[in-house]
Amino acid sequence: MTGTTAHPLVASGVVYTPPVATGRLLAGLDLRVEPGEIVGLTGPSGSGKTTIVRLLSGLIAPDAGSVRLGDTPVGEIRAASGRAVRGRIGVTFQSPRAAMDPRMRLDRAIELSAREAARRGPAGARPVPLDGLAETLGLTSGLLHRRPHEVSDGQLQRAALLRTLAHQPEIVLCDEITAALDRISAAVAMRLLDEIAHRHGRGVLVVSHDHPLVVAVADRVLMVGNGRTVQRPSAPTTLSDPHSGIDSTLGRS
Ligand SMILES: Nc1ncnc2c1ncn2[C@@H]1O[C@H](COP(=O)(O)OP(=O)(O)OP(=O)(O)O)[C@@H](O)[C@H]1O
């Protein structure tokens, strides 16, 4: 990515206790996603992965510590406008039904997002070309002509990813987006994220409890433990795990 300014997303010393929880969930979390890299975040169920995504996107605020995109706290970006934050930090959640307007056709939702991005202009990064992305994700025009309740969870998940990318965000946060996908669709989605990061200079966070998948796609893998993140080496032994099947589909050897 040349001639543009993109920013790292940085969480520093984040402390967070959920509203009705018995204790601290995050106790000094540090995490950094640079433009042009894929960071994998893994950890057991209930360790706080989705909460971290919510904090990173400014949906909730930390009790202490900070989350910034470049120099700007993400809470400030979100407070300025929901549109502003969508254009800078794109999020695709495990259950996209709640995030999609049930009355709107999928192609219309994607088109509106692309228009919003075009009006705003390039925000620190060259636009990701959307042509052919639907096809890459196995989404036919017939499918995209439907409303959310007229498609399967996996189809909706892929459409939600496409809509996130149509916003042209600097940072893409993906929370368990392969949960409803078959192995091949998951590999295709991961290969797309690989391109988004390494060819188009976006920072990408892939959150999943599927450790082999995370290791196969990420440049760095972090594990949530004791309310903090621990750096894990992306061990090549795991990349060549014959049970993974993802590495070869990603074109890695
Ligand atoms: N709004 C809330 N109020 C109370 N507790 C919450 C709230 N949100 C999350 N928690 C608790 O915080 C912990 C972490 O939840 P979170 O959804 O972040 O975990 P996770 O690692 O994403 O889990 P999974 O892999 O099962 O999706 C859980 O114990 C959960 O019950």
Image (tube, helix red, strand yellow):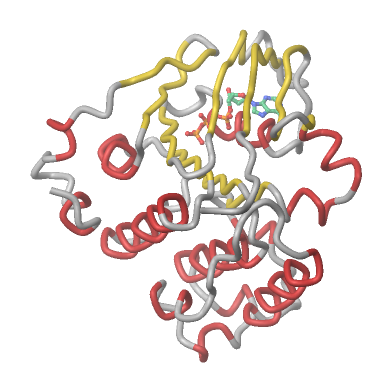
Total labels: the figure holds: 0
Identify the residue at the far front of this view: 3
Residue drawn at x 70%, y 75% as measured from the top left: 109
Q: Can residue 180 be seen here?
A: no
The quadrant of the picture showing ligand 1 is: top right
Up the image or down, 27 lies above or below 150; here it is: above
Q: Can residue 209 be seen here?
A: yes
Identify the residue at the far right of this view: 80
Q: In screen coordinates, is 36 left or right of 170?
A: left
Residue drawn at x 43%, y 54% as measured from the top left: 193
Up the image or down, 177 lies above or below 28; here it is: below
- Quarter-of-image position of residue 117: bottom right
Residue 65, position as x, y percentages in the image = 73, 14
Q: In screen coordinates, is 199 left or right of 65?
A: left
Residue 103, position as x, y percentages in the image = 76, 77
- Quarter-of-image position of residue 218: top left
Residue drawn at x 63%, y 49% as measured from the top left: 170
Residue 110, position as x, y percentages in the image = 65, 74
Of residue 120 and residue 232, the one placed in the foreground of this image is 120
